Structure formats: C-alpha cells, structure tokens
Image (cartoon, grey):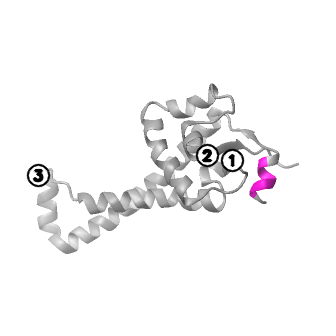
Amino acid sequence: MTAERNSKKAGPAPVWRRFAAIIYDSFLVLAIALFMGFINLGIQMQIYGSEQLKSMTESGQSVGGPAFYMVLFLSIFSFFAFFWTRRGQTLGMQAWKICILSNEGNYITLQQSLIRWFVAIPSLLLGGLGIFWSLWDKQGCSWQDRFSNTRTLYIPSQK
C-alpha cells in the first residue's frame, strides 16, 4: 500500500492511539537498550576483565561512558528512522493503525525523522504535552508534527 493511498482515507490520529503506540514501541526500545547494554558489558569485560569490572560496578562506577550512550542514542534513533522513512510506521504504530506522512502525503525523510526525534523528547518529558497539543491544534498536529512538517494519521481498516 502506498503512502498517498493511505493518506486519502486517513484523519488525525487520536491521542489515545498515539500513546498506545508509544507504549508498544517503548517495549521494543527497552529491548534495544538491553541488547546494547549486553554488548557494552561484553566489551567492558574484554577490556577490564570480570574481576575489575565487578569491583567497578560494586563501587558504583558507571560502565557506560559517553561512547556507549552515543551508540545507544543512535541505535534507538535508527529504529524509529528506519520504520518512519520506509513504511511510515513503527511496529507499535502498525498495531494501532497510525502512520506518519509528510504534509505532501509521502513517507518522511531522514531529516524529518531527526527533527521529530528531537522534538519528541521534550514533548514526552513534559508529561506528553506535545502530544496532547493535538487536541487543541486545528489540524490535529502534535509538536513533532508541526516542527517536522509531518502528520500523524489514523488509517482505518480496509474493508
């Protein structure tokens, strides 16, 4: 199904569907974070050895470091960017029948994904205010939608 065909039958996604997709995707993000953490732990064990690593963690030292957090950030962003730019939907969005398209009705670009990602962080950290904003916006757009020139749409089932 093409992006344009989807957008013709769609309207703004309800807030509850947006949050349901976020909850669903948060489990996938948690899995990515755990996987990256296990990889980091394996690398740290190779560098420091298990005994020194154990004493480091027992003393409260972080075994992450800036490189780990950068890789973690890029991994999570890559998850969203991959799905948004190729299908307009993450797995959670597919389950809740919502998608993200550009204002022109196409799948979004990597640049739009990056803008959405950076705007979504404060949007969610402020209690979801940026998503609740869609309740008052005349076009049903969230902060992420407005700043990235995209729309989050509900795609009803095809019957």
Location of residue 54 in the rendering, given as x and y in whole percent from the top left corner:
15, 61
- Relative to the observer, which residue lies in front, 140 or 78? 140
- Residue 64 is at least partly visible in this image: no
The image quadrant of residue 131 is: top right
Q: Residue furthest right?
A: 159
Residue marked by disc 2: 149
Mark 3 or mark 2: which comes first in sequence?
Answer: 3
**Who comes first in sequence, dot 3 or dot 1?**
3
Element class at badge 2: loop
* Residue 139: x %, y % from top left: 69, 33
Q: What quarter of the picture does the N terminus occupy?
A: bottom right
Distance (Cα) linking label 2 and label 1? 6 Å
Q: Where, by quadrant of the figure, is residue 20 drawn? A: top right
Query: What element does badge 3 sit on?
Result: loop
User: Residue 59, labelled with which disc?
Assistant: 3
| Amino acid type shown at disc 3 | Ser
3 or 1: mark nearer the eye:
1
Q: CA distance from mark 3 to mark 2?
A: 47 Å
Q: Which mark is residue 103?
A: 1
Q: Which residues are magenta?
A: 3-7
Marks 2 & 1, CB-CB < 8 Å contact: yes
Q: Are marks 3 and 2 in contact (CB under 8 Å)?
A: no
The residue shown at (68%, 28%) is: 138
